[in-house]
Image: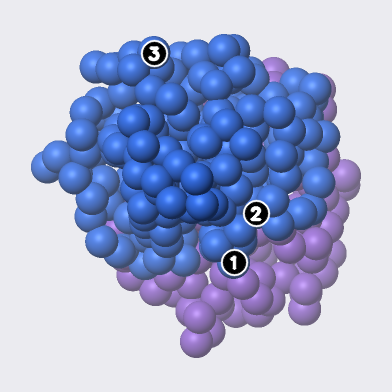
Chain colours: A purple, B blue
Amino acid sequence: MPRGMAELTGKTIAVLAAKGVERIELVEPRAAVDAAGATTHLLSVPDGVTDGTVQSVDGDIHPGETFPVHALVGEVSADDYDGLLLPGGAVNPDTLRQDPDALAFVKAFMDAGKPVAAICHAPWTLLEAETLSGRTLTSYPSIRGDLRRGGATVVDEEVCRDGNLVTSRDPDDVPAFSAAAVELFAGG
Amino acid sequence: MPRGMAELTGKTIAVLAAKGVERIELVEPRAAVDAAGATTHLLSVPDGVTDGTVQSVDGDIHPGETFPVHALVGEVSADDYDGLLLPGGAVNPDTLRQDPDALAFVKAFMDAGKPVAAICHAPWTLLEAETLSGRTLTSYPSIRGDLRRGGATVVDEEVCRDGNLVTSRDPDDVPAFSAAAVELFAGG
C-alpha cells in the first residue's frame, strides 16, 4: 500500500484531551490519522469538558476552537481502541492527571504495549500514571525535570520513538509528529 | 502593634508571576501585604510578559485582568527584597520554571531562609529550582506527585507552614493564605 494511503483503515484511535489542549496539537495529528483511514474519538474527563466540548487554546492561554467530545474516558475501555493520541497544552494534562479514569486509561495502553503518541506537555499524564520509569522520550522543556525525577530518560529531538511510544516537543514538531504517529499506529 | 496594622511597614516583597497567573491568587494576597504596609513589586520573565504586563486567568484558561510589571526578575536581586510571594495558575509556573533567572531568584530566597509564600501550582517553580527536598508543603493536587518525586512531603491542608515556607492549595484557600503570608513576612 502506498505510504499514507489508508494505512489505518479499520483502526480506531482514541484522542484524549481536556480544556486547555493546544489546538494545533489536537487538530493536525488527528487530521493525519483520519486521512490515513482511521476512525478517531475525542475522549475527555468531567473537569475538562463544558457543554459537551473541549475548549482549546492557541499558545497556552489564548482561547481557541472548541471540539465536541465523543465520550468521557470513564465510559469507554482501552480495549476498544488500537492506539492513543495525546495532544499537549499545559492545562490539558494538568486536568487529565487529576482524573483516575484518565490515568487508568493511559496506563492500560502502556501496560499492553499498545501504540501511544504524545506531544508537548502530554507526557505529564503518562508520568502521573507511573508508566515512564525506564522509558526514553522527549517533551516540552518545562516538564523534563519532572519526567527525569519519574525515572525517564529525556532527549531533545523532534520525534523520539521508544517501542510503543512516540513523543515530540512542541507545536513546531507537529508535522513530523503527525507522520510518526500514523506510522506508529500502522504498526510500522 | 495591633495585628494586621502596618506590621510590614518598611519591607519590600517580591511578587513573581508570568502569563497564566491565577488572578485571585495574585490580587488578594498582594492586597493583604500592601494593606499591612509593605511595598510590593510584580516581577516576571521575558516569556511571561506582553507589552509590559502579565496576562492573568480566571479558572486556568479564561483570560482575566492584566497587571503591569515592575521589572524582569533578571534585572533585580533577591537581596533587594524581604520576602517572596508566588501566586499560582498552571501556565504561570510552567513559564517561570523554564527561566534560569527565575529559578536562581527563588533559590536565593530558599537558600537564605528568607520568607516565601506559595499557593496552588507555584511550588512547581520551587521544585524546579531544587529547593524542596526534605521540605513539607501543600499544593494544588495536580503537582503533588511531582513534588513527592522531588523529595518533598506533601500534606493536604489549607495552610502549611514549614520554617520560611508557607503554602496553600487553591483559590478557596486565598483568605487563609493571605493572612499566613502577612504573618510570615512580619517574622511571626
**Residue A143 appears left or right of B57:** right
Q: Residue furthest right?
A: A111
Q: Tell me which amino acid carries mark 2.
A: Arg
Position of residue B115 measured from the top left corner of the image (x, y, whole percent): 55, 28
Depth check, front residue: A133 or B107: B107
Q: Secondary structure at mark 1?
A: helix
Q: Secondary structure at mark 3?
A: helix
Tell me which residue sits at (19%, 45%) in the image: B68
Please give the residue where the numbered disc 2 appears in the rendered image. Answer: B169
Task: Say whether mark 3 and mark 2 are on the same chain.
Answer: yes
Mark 2, other Cα within 10 Å: few <14 / some 14–19 / many ≥20: many
Q: Residue furthest front?
A: B1
**Residue A116 appears left or right of A107:** left
Q: Tell me which amino acid carries mark 1.
A: Asp
- In primary-sequence order, the first of circles 1 and 3 is 3
Tell me which residue sits at (48%, 72%) in the image: A54
Where B139 falls versus A12 (above or below)? above
Q: Residue furthest bottom?
A: A51
Tell me the distance, in whole angstroms, between the alpha carbons under discs 1 and 2. 8 Å
Location of residue B52 by image quarter:
top left
Tell me the distance, in whole angstroms, between the alpha carbons under discs 1 and 3. 32 Å
- The mark closer to the camera, 1 or 3, is 3
Tell me which residue sits at (61%, 58%) in the image: B176
Depth check, front residue: A12 or A101: A101
Please give the residue where the numbered disc 3 appears in the rendered image. Answer: B79
Q: Tell me which amino acid carries mark 3.
A: Asp
Mark 1, other Cα within 10 Å: few <14 / some 14–19 / many ≥20: few
Residue A40 numbered mark, or none: none
Position of residue A38 measured from the top left corner of the image (x, y, whole percent): 58, 63
